[in-house]
Amino acid sequence: MKVGIIGCGAIARGRHIPAYLENPHTQLAALYDPVPGRAKQLAEEYNAAAYENLEEMLRHPGLEAVSVCTPEQYHHDIVIAALQNGKHVLCEKPMAMNAAQAGEMERAAAESGRLLMISHNQRIYEPHWKAKELLEAGTIGRLLSFRTFLSHSGPEQGCGSESERAAYFDRFEGNGGVMLSVGCHRIDLIDWLFGERITSVMAYLQTLDKRKSDGELIRDEDTAMVLLRCESGLSGMLYAGWCTYGCTDRETHIFGTEGVMKLFEDPWSVTVYKKSGEKIYYDLSAWAEKGSKGATAIIDRFVECVRDGKEAFVTAREGVRCMRVLDAIAQSGRTGAWVDVK
């Protein structure tokens, strides 16, 4: 299957390109980036065609599928163009800038008859699969509440030079804040892990430390604290941040009537603390070393779905639902009130 990459930045170079090169069912055929020379440099390395015009790239002979790895603000137009040109699409998270855009992308996929999958890669992490299995088995009894964290030192840390890091938010401030970039992962995970739709939210969104090159704080939040209610009455809190310096915090704690489950308390682990005093530890580091590779397994799932004619591993409908929650969080951050998810 001939595949293409739209947007040749860090996420493409670190995840999508290596995954397609290693997958025995795909040929990396075409690369597009509007920055002069960026696609050409990679194309020469991987024996692919380079394009600086998107429409020309989408007409590459035999091209069947593309990964959209551009900044978030460009997802909507590019995904729709790719679908209308008959391509299957794997779109990096978040799906769009808001639910209205996401809904238009979902409709375009339905009209095109092509697969649109969203790259919410938290679903492929083995600790999350193990936790879902244990929850469904009733290991900690009836669920009471949860808290989940996903924070790191910021997206600018992926830039190669100090000057690029300093200017990162000058170029990409229009992509939204930490909830769109990071929090979307946890919104999708809550829905999938608990089998619960989030129905209302209360958000406190702050800008604590991220600045543009002139020293001014960025426009959008770099830290988010959100309370969430689900349809069954299950409730919890979410913390997403770009100001966690020195480590990445990705723990999730789930509280039940028979104990507590902790995900990523140690790297790549699930630990169950039973109220009887028993502790059960699942070491999943071997899976991480063998299969994680920076979450490239989500790309393999996309290829499998296209080849076998399966429903997307993360559907456009689920992507739209995630965007509706994010819209509600943004509204709550502005108003300081509980907001129902539409």
Image: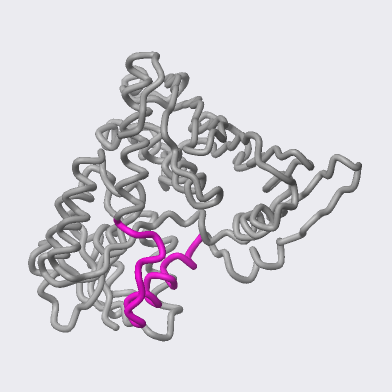
Query: What is the basis of the colouring in this image?
Result: one colour
On screen, residue 51 above or below 333: below
Instruction: Look at 23% across and 73% down and name the residue there.
Output: 30
Magenta-tinted stretch = 295-316
Place of residue 89 in the rendered image (x, y in percent of width and height, measured from the top left): 26, 65
Outermost residue toward the top? 336
In this rendering, would 65 be left or right of 130? Answer: left
On screen, residue 248 above or below 281: above
Instruction: Look at 45% across and 19% down and name the residue there.
Output: 204
Q: Nearer the viewer, residue 170 or 85?
A: 85
On screen, residue 270 above or below 114: above
Instruction: Look at 34% across and 29% down and name the residue there.
Output: 328
In this rendering, would 298 be left or right of 93? Answer: right
Q: Note whether residue 213 is visible.
A: no
Place of residue 151 in the rendered image (x, y in percent of width and height, measured from the top left): 54, 36
Q: Nearer the viewer, residue 196 or 331?
A: 196
> For the N terminus, which image quadrant?
bottom left
In this rendering, would 49 be left or right of 338? Answer: left
On screen, residue 131 above or below 46: above
Q: Quadrant of residue 289?
A: bottom right
Tally of marks: 0
The verdict on residue 333 being magenta is: no
Place of residue 269 in the rendered image (x, y in percent of width and height, measured from the top left): 72, 54
Instruction: Look at 64% across and 63% down and name the residue there.
Output: 288
